Image (cartoon, rainbow, N blue to C red):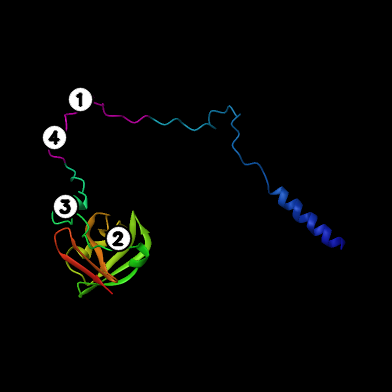
Amino acid sequence: MQLRYAVTGLVVTLALAGCQRTAYDYSSNSPSAAPAPLTAQPVPSVQGGQLPPPSGSSQFPAAPASASSMPGAQPAVAANALDVTKESMVGSWRVNGSCDMFLTLTNLGSGSRGGTRGCVGELTAMGSWEVAGKQVLLKDRSGNAIGSVYKTADNRFQGQTNTGQPISLSR
């Protein structure tokens, strides 16, 4: 038992002996201890003046228009549109009888994630969707509306893209 205490004491002593202060002593007035100052770099002269007014044509593109002001967009929901809920839209849909659309509840921007497989035209760019009143808005990956559909019967939706391509969803 004595050997155990002796070994423990020796380990503690060696550990404490290894702890030394290695910080720089700033109170030293030795000129060789201070680092040499850096030389300044030349700076070109700065010009001042008034900027010209912006020209009529900008280098930036115009902001995207809303779906209702785009040509070919549906101005209003059809009179026979039925109520639609976000939960009832989730899953796989057949588009125009020729391709598939998948809708999830995973958030993506202001809508939910969605996509298509095997579709042509604007629907290939679909990345999200959202329910707005009785309409389901289909959006591209940037959040711009590319079309909309409305419920006409159970598991059946009709609508069009902003360019007038008809959309028919069914299960």
Magenta-drawn stretch contains 126? no
- State the CA–CA distance, disc 3 to disc 2: 19 Å
Residue 101 is situated, as x and y percent measured from the top left of the image, at 27, 69
Q: Main secondary structure of the magenta part?
A: loop
Q: Which mark is first along the chain, 2 or 4?
A: 4
Give the left or right position of residue 60, taking residue 86 as reference: left
Q: CB of mark 3 within 8 Å of CB of mark 2?
A: no
Q: Which mark is first along the chain, 2 or 1?
A: 1
Location of residue 103 by image quarter: bottom left
The residue labelled by disc 4 is: 55
Q: Residues within 10 Å of mark 2 (few under 14, many from 20)?
A: many
The residue labelled by disc 3 is: 70
* The one of 24 and 159 positioned closer to us in this rendering: 159
Image: 26 above or below 144: above
What residue sits 31% from the left and 58% below the top?
130
Disc 4 is placed on an element classified as loop
The residue labelled by disc 1 is: 50
